Image (spheres, rainbow, N blue to C red):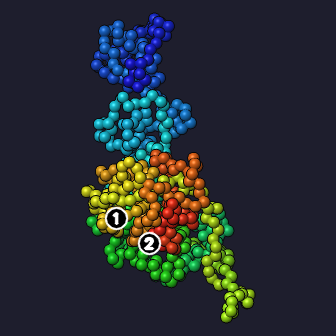
Amino acid sequence: DDAVRGTVAWDAESTVGDFILLRSSGIPVYNFCVAVDDASMGVTTVVRAEEHLTNTLRQGLILDALGAPRPRYAHCSLILGEDKQKLSKRHGATSCNQFRLDGFLPDAMINYLALLGWNDGTDNEIFTRDELIDAFSVNRVVKSPSIFDMDKLKWINSQHLKMYSIEELTEMVAEQMEMLGFFKEGSDPEKINEFVVATTSLAKQMMETTQDAATNAKTVLEYGLAESFDKMEDGQAKTMIKNGNFYPVATTLVKQFEAGELPLPDPKEPLAIFLDGKKKAIVEDNQSGGGAYSFPQAYSAHMKALSKDLNVKGKCLFHPLRLAVTGEMSGQDIPKQMALLSLASDENGAVDMEKNGVVTLDDRIAKLKSFCETIPEEFRATKVVKKEIAENTEQVAATNTNTETVAATPAEADPLDTYEGPAITSLDIRVGRITKVWEHPEADKLYCEEVDVGEDEPRQIASGLKAFMKPEDMEGRLVLVLCNLKARKMLGFASHGMVMCASNEDHTDVKFVSPPVDAKVGERVTVPGFNFDGEAGVPMKENPMGKKKIFDKLAPFLVTSKYGVPEFLGRPFMTSAGVCTSPISEGNVA
């Protein structure tokens, strides 16, 4: 009676016959040894691989002959590689130490290995070690083989990393950075610690392994802007430059830097932007430290003034700005990246600049200036033809075909033509109604919300809206809820889903994305031009949503228009009652 496979029977005589117990050398065979060993130690349960199933018959007969009780057997199926073949050395790193070197946490490894062929009967996949001990039962082990999925392991590791504070992670991140050769020999430990804290804070929200913090820092310290416009690969960045959005912002930035007008990190307070008022490291991407006159606040005020001076805002300002400063079209908060670069660029600091390819801000501005000189004239300002219209007192007619060229914004190419990310139909965004709001008992910045999304029971969702809204302003509101996110514990509160909000670029203003008042609770939000019907429109299941980081890949394309309409690639969020709206124009939706 196998605990995993149920009743298993053999014809003993035809299967084993008169089998050998001792070799001619007098050394006992394996099956005899383990049977005696189990009997002498009083083993009650033997859990092992299915490859040993045929050995069970011989061992059982030996135990019977010895007059010893048979233990309970549980034969687990083999673990297969992603190619569906038996897991072996050809599938990559197999030693525990290699996984440690790759940045995986011990508890995450235990969590993942326990799930290979076992579950607790619920949808929960994240367990602490103590929770696994309490929940595990051999009766829940399944007999079908499991696939060792590295993406799933990374996702589980990322969930465990979220349970750690930055202070708890710094030692592990420092180990990764040492292995990658980040620091100069004999560096001041305090300087190393400062850089590691900044690195960990910057990468905390996107980390799947502790190694990710180190590799992210390398990306931040490098500068990926091409040498010239002609050498740029086709893509989002080149399209933006062709639309004329980049040149005015980039050249102004160069002038301001050369004139000493661009706010820069304060070398006397290198960690200010990464620490809150209690000097604890900040986790959230959208929050920054520093006082009223510190670098983050000065930078924010400067960018608002720049927006006004150039008469540009939203993505027409911040996308060019990001490319100019970081050389990338996406990434973490620009001031935080500048602060990390400032730490790395300190000649008396801990970072080995040459070995890590550090491109200082001075060198970036010089390279940016040179790049701008290669941008063709037709992409330095956008043009459109304006016709002068003469009006007759009796009728309006075009009587003058004089034309003149003026600076304006042309009709842009359809962004869907160059989009290569996941389908918007992957998301299950539904209309919901907030029925109850209360403060999270353990977290100062979180609310707990009960939201009706048309299911049998309301969802419970934790959100960081406490700094922006009051409970009385939230209860009873119709909202949009991203429903196919895996439930996860946020300081002990099981949060299942995300209430969608719009925010401005520096995240100082956050408002709900609202469906029309006549929208039906539980209905799915759609986007024109995409098929939400049939098999193609079925939203992705929660597990692959998390493992493949689908929302993270879609998020940069979820924005609000200049009229506050939430959009994906220029197409509005729709319900049966009409278009969704937001009070925030040209913002981000998350």
Residue 135: x and y, percent? 32, 36
Label 1 vs 2, first from the N-terminus? 1
**x 55%, y 77%: residue:** 249
**x 27%, y 65%: residue:** 278
Q: Which residue is mark 1?
A: 474
As helix, strand or loop, the secondary structure at mark 1 comes to helix
**x 45%, y 28%: residue:** 143
**x 36%, y 23%: residue:** 46
Amino acid marked by disc 1: Met
As helix, strand or loop, the secondary structure at mark 2 comes to loop
Residue 439: x and y, percent? 28, 60
Of residues 404 and 521, which is closer to you in this image? 521
Q: Which residue is mark 2?
A: 583
**Quadrant occupied by the C terminus:** bottom left
Q: Is residue 558 found left or right of 394 in the rendered image?
A: left
Amino acid marked by disc 2: Pro
**Tag on residue 408?**
none
- In the figure, residue 223 lies in which quadrant? bottom right
Does 113 sit above or below residue 572?
Answer: above
Q: Is residue 551 at least partly visible in the picture? A: no
**Quadrant occupied by the N terminus:** top left
Of residues 577 and 343, which is closer to you in this image? 577
Residue 207: x and y, percent? 43, 54
Does 5 sit above or below residue 398?
Answer: above
